[in-house]
Image (tube, rainbow, N blue to C red):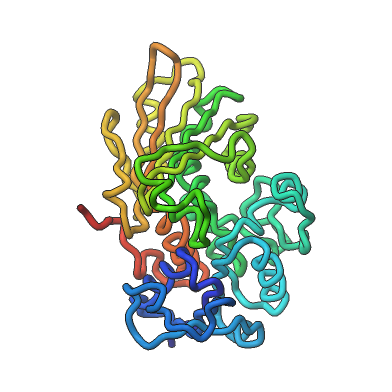
């Protein structure tokens, strides 16, 4: 029997990508596609790729509680309220917002507001706290797969942290504390569907700009879940003139004796058995376009022995592995389904 699922925030880019993926899922029935301001409108009126008779539903908590799992593809404000209500009703949740990725204390520091349900936030640096099954699990399967399988509440990672952690986590034992610097670039869909002057085509086209530095919220998320005690991380995101795709370049000083072989071994040990991560040969770099529409990841690292640093690059689709694809990967694990169901590591090219 298929599991009944719903999406709140289905009119956003991440929510619409979830609709697309779920329409092809053999074991999940999409019962609710809720969107507050677009309720009653045809889904295809916003997303012509989602042709059909489906219309956006009202956000009805009673109806959501009756489902097997709910994806929250909303900003963190609505997710904070709905996530708590759904979990207290024992409904499984995958939250795509930043509402439950950090401890209550860190959430307050990075988001500038108190967390309404601190009992549901994760324990620092722990994927799933013993004896506290209601707490959110950080949903990066390549790091916390076993914890996700037993969870009813998953905090889907942010797009930048997904790429940064996948690139740097295997290398953390090889790096000097306090040396990690991350440069991130994302397509404009990462900023969401809401109209904003800085996202007008005439402003974005032919332009490249940084934003959010040095205190972008994803910095705290990266620092929280990066293994080891590497100290503060410097992170600068950039907006690039394309609709989707995300690329990070991470730098870190290597400890004594670390060279190309140690770096390559660390990446291959971490990812050779992973279904969605492809380690490229040193000197070969990822392409965002190669991952468009997929849940795939490309990662590569080279060692600058002259400078004593490693340079790691990682690319994903910000709406795929960076949002909806990873959310579905987590849902598959939570519901005991094959992890790769309705997902592909191969992008659409060209």
Left/right placement of residue 13 relative to residue 235 reads left
> Residue 145: in sight, yes or no?
no
> Residue 223: in sight, yes or no?
yes
Q: Position of residue 75 (x, y in %)?
A: 60, 62
Q: Position of residue 148 (x, y in %)?
A: 55, 61
Total labels drawn? 0
Outermost residue toward the top in this view: 306
Q: Quadrant of the N terminus?
A: bottom left
Q: Position of residue 115 (x, y in %)?
A: 76, 58
- Residue at image position (62%, 56%) is 98
Q: Nearer the viewer, residue 287 or 129?
A: 287
Q: Quadrant of residue 232?
A: top right
- Residue at image position (50%, 33%) is 182
Does 214 sit above or below residue 162? above
Q: Position of residue 337 (x, y in %)?
A: 43, 72
Does 324 sit above or below residue 264? below
Q: Nearer the viewer, residue 202 or 103?
A: 202
- Residue at image position (52%, 29%) is 181
Does 246 sit above or below residue 261? below
- Residue at image position (41%, 34%) is 266
Left/right placement of residue 15 relative to residue 116 reads left
């Amino acid at each position: 029997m298929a599991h009944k699922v719903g999406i709140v925030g289905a009119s956003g880019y991440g929510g619409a990508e979830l609709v697309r993926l779920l329409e092809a899922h053999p074991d999940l029935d999409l019962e609710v596609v809720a969107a507050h301001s677009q309720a009653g409108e045809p889904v295809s009126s916003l997303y012509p790729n989602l042709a059909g008779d489906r219309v956006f539903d009202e956000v009805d908590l009673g109806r959501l509680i009756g489902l097997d799992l709910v994806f929250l593809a909303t900003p963190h404000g609505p997710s904070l309220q709905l996530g708590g209500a759904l979990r207290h009703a024992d409904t499984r949740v995958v939250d795509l917002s930043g509402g439950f990725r950090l401890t209550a204390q860190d959430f307050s520091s990075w988001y500038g507001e108190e967390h309404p349900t601190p009992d549901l936030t994760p324990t620092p640096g722990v994927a799933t706290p013993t004896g506290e099954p209601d707490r959110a699990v950080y949903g990066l399967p390549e790091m916390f797969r076993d914890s996700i399988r037993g969870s009813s509440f998953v905090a889907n990672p942010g797009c930048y942290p997904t790429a940064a952690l996948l690139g740097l986590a295997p290398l953390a034992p090889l790096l000097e504390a306090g040396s990690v610097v991350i440069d991130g670039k994302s397509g404009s869909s990462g900023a969401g569907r809401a109209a904003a002057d800085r996202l007008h085509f005439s402003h974005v086209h032919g332009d490249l700009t940084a934003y959010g530095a040095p205190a972008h919220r994803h910095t705290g998320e990266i620092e929280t879940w990066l293994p080891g005690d590497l100290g503060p991380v410097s992170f600068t995101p950039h907006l690039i003139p394309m609709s989707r795709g995300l690329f990070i370049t991470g730098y870190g000083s290597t400890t004594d004796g670390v060279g190309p072989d140690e770096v390559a071994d660390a990446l291959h040990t971490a990812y050779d058995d992973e279904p969605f991560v492809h380690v490229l040969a040193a000197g070969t770099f990822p392409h965002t376009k190669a991952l468009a529409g997929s849940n795939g990841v490309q990662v590569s690292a080279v060692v600058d022995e002259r400078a004593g640093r490693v340079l790691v690059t990682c690319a994903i689709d910000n709406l795929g592995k960076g949002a909806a694809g990873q959310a579905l990967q987590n849902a598959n694990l939570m519901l005991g389904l094959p992890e790769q169901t309705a997902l592909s590591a191969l992008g659409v090219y060209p």
